[in-house]
Amino acid sequence: MLKKLLLMVLMLAPLSVFAQKFAHYNSEDIAKTYPAYLTAQTELEALGKQYEADIQEMQKELQTKYEKYQNEVNESTPANMRQRREQELSDLQQRIQQAYQDNQKSYQEEAAKKIQPIMQKLQDAVQAVLKEGGYVYAIDKSSTSVAINETISVDITAQIKSKLGI
């Protein structure tokens, strides 16, 4: 009797796979309409433009000093004066490179600080929709190259938007 019961359970177990529900969503579509994400993107773009303007200003200064150096320094210029001017140019070029690296690092940190909470809210909304709908898996269409059979998978993008208040 126990063997028959065990055999019956083993035979029915694979059928439970067919009862699983699968979902898909489009995070790109959600991001395009999510006000917090759009605000963060706008702020990051402004920050990037500011950093770019700062670097361009420093490069203009370098260019101006280099042109001045070329016009003032010639064969009759004392060696110590020439070396001092060359050192100034070299120092300015190093400051520009350091500023570029610092700006990149600062931009990445700011992006992480602004985007991480938004992505966490998105993940929380996805998890809530999965739990409420009894879905086993949800695949993000915008970030995967996996082919999705949308006829047997439910699109939960609208439900996620609803959870996010969009």
Image (cartoon, rainbow, N blue to C red):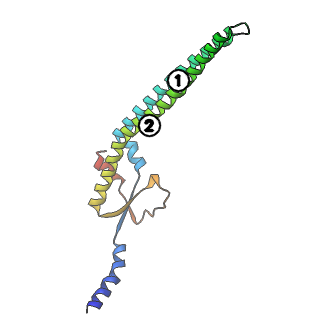
Is residue 9 positioned above or below 91 on the image?
Answer: below
Residue placed at 38% from the left, 47% from the top? 30
User: Which residue bears the numbered disc 1?
Assistant: 95
Residue 54 rendering spot, x and y as whole percentages: 49, 23
3D distance between C-alphas at marks 1 and 2: 20 Å
Q: Is residue 132 shown left or right of residue 17?
A: left
Is residue 149 positioned above or below 158 on the image?
Answer: below
Q: Is residue 20 shown left or right of residue 90?
A: left
Q: Quadrant of the N terminus?
A: bottom left
Secondary structure state at the residue bearing disc 1:
helix
Q: In the image shown, does 66 or 14 lie closer to the viewer?
A: 66
Is residue 111 positioned above or below 139 on the image?
Answer: above
In the rendered image, the residue lying farthest to the front is 80
The image's mark for residue 108 is 2
Residue placed at 68% from the left, 8% from the top? 78
Residue placed at 61% from the left, 13% from the top? 84
Q: Is residue 132 shown left or right of residue 82?
A: left
